[in-house]
Image (spheres, grey):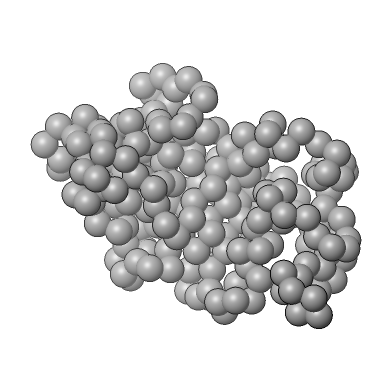
Amino acid sequence: EIKDISFEYNPNNKVINEFNLGIKKGETIAIVGESGSGKSTLTDLILGLITPQSGFIFIDDQPINEIDLISYRNKIGYVSQETILIHDTVKNNILWGNTHSLNDKQFGEICKLSHVDGFVKKMPEHYNTIIGDKGTMLSGGQRQRLAIARALARKPEILILDEATSSLDSDSERLIQKSIDSLSGEISIIIIIAHRLSTVVN
């Protein structure tokens, strides 16, 4: 629950002003607005990276400043507009930074949910294919689907998609939307941040 929060980077210039939002388990919500309207600031507040000047954020009825933030963030999968990939295999990029153990079946399910399996089957060594520095062998849509798979490998209770499709062409965006639709019911809470209504029409 977000209750009456306000936040400003500069005095007398509030990015967020007395904002309220309640999110229940099982919900997918969308936050839509133009660039500079405070969407990413709201994400940082939800993640506990910044603190509101006024108001409160509660996680399961506990103030966010009183919970173990490391434990809380470990329950969150985050996908941003910029995908960070390493010069390694598809599989290692998906598992990069993950602290959960996944068996082959679980890994396969994640790749299907994120629609990674479709393009990986066409690659020379499938999941053992090296994708190049920063994923240069992949298209923008493929990189984003890989980022979603990486977020899912964390087994998150909350998935945040922060402008995850904003730089993609319409075909790639459609596949990402398909991934998001597939996740409904698989994850406790999905928060989609976008500046286009078409991204969240469903």
Q: How many marks?
A: 0
Location of residue 49 in the rendering, given as x and y in whole percent from the top left corner: 68, 50
**Foreground pick, 140 / 16:** 16
**Foreground pick, 57 / 202:** 57
**Foreground pick, 44 / 192:** 44
Q: Residue at x 43, y 68 (%)?
A: 166
Residue 100 position (above or below residue 156):
above
Q: As drawn, which residue projects farthest toward the left?
A: 124
Q: Residue at x 85, y 71 (%)?
A: 18
Residue 73 position (above or below residue 18):
above
Q: Residue at x 49, y 38 (%)?
A: 152
Residue 168 in view of the camera: yes
Q: Is residue 58 left or right of residue 196?
A: right
* Residue 91 figure quarter: top left
Location of residue 73 in the rendering, given as x and y in whole percent from the top left corner: 65, 39
Q: Quadrant of the N terminus?
A: bottom right
**Foreground pick, 43 / 160:** 43
Q: Is residue 38 left or right of residue 79?
A: right
Location of residue 87 in the rendering, given as x and y in whole percent from the top left corner: 26, 39
Q: Residue at x 36, y 21 (%)?
A: 104
Residue 126 in view of the camera: no
Location of residue 113 in the rendering, given as x and y in whole percent from the top left corner: 41, 42
